[in-house]
Image: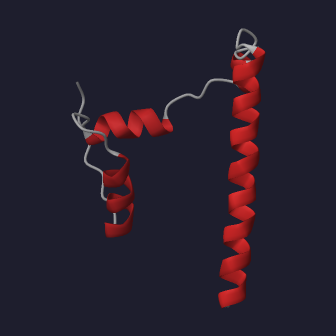
Amino acid sequence: MDIKTVALDGEAYELLRKRKKQGESFSDVVKRIAGPRRPLTDFAGIWKDIPREEFRKIVEAIRKAREMDLERMDRLLKRW
């Protein structure tokens, strides 16, 4: 295996360190983050077998999360 030395400033190092999972090397993190990405079309139809009731629960959870985000934003803007 060929080894290269890379210089990072402190901010870049901290960003990389925060992404590092237990047991991963920094090389593993870089490969995971910068490696090839799957095209969005690979995920088409992935939810097709989810029962209608489960899908409804997911949609409702997303709706509630968006509502909470808007409420949080309103509170923050009022403080400003």
Location of the C terminus (image quadrant):
bottom right
Above or below residue 79? Residue 54 is: above
In the foreground, 29 or 51 = 51
Give the x, y percent position of residue 78: 72, 87
User: Is residue 75 left or right of 35 when viewed as pictured?
Assistant: right
Give the x, y percent position of residue 17: 31, 53
User: Is residue 20 left or right of 42 when viewed as pictured?
Assistant: left
Q: Quadrant of residue 10?
A: bottom left
Location of the N terminus (image quadrant):
top left
What is the residue that sits farthest to the front in this orientation?
53
- What residue lies at 21% left-to-right and 34% top-to-bottom? 23
Q: Quadrant of residue 72?
A: bottom right
What is the residue that sits farthest to the bottom in this orientation?
80
Give the x, y percent position of residue 8: 33, 60
User: Is residue 68 left or right of 6 when viewed as pictured?
Assistant: right
Give the x, y percent position of residue 14: 33, 61
Q: Quadrant of residue 59?
A: top right
Above or below residue 62? Residue 49 is: above
Q: How many dots with numbers?
A: 0
In the foreground, 46 or 39 = 46
Above or below residue 48? Residue 16 is: below
- What residue lies at 71% left-to-right and 17% top-to-bottom? 47
- What residue lies at 70% left-to-right and 32% top-to-bottom? 58
- What residue lies at 70% left-to-right and 72% top-to-bottom? 73
Above or below residue 20? Residue 7 is: below
Colour logic: secondary structure
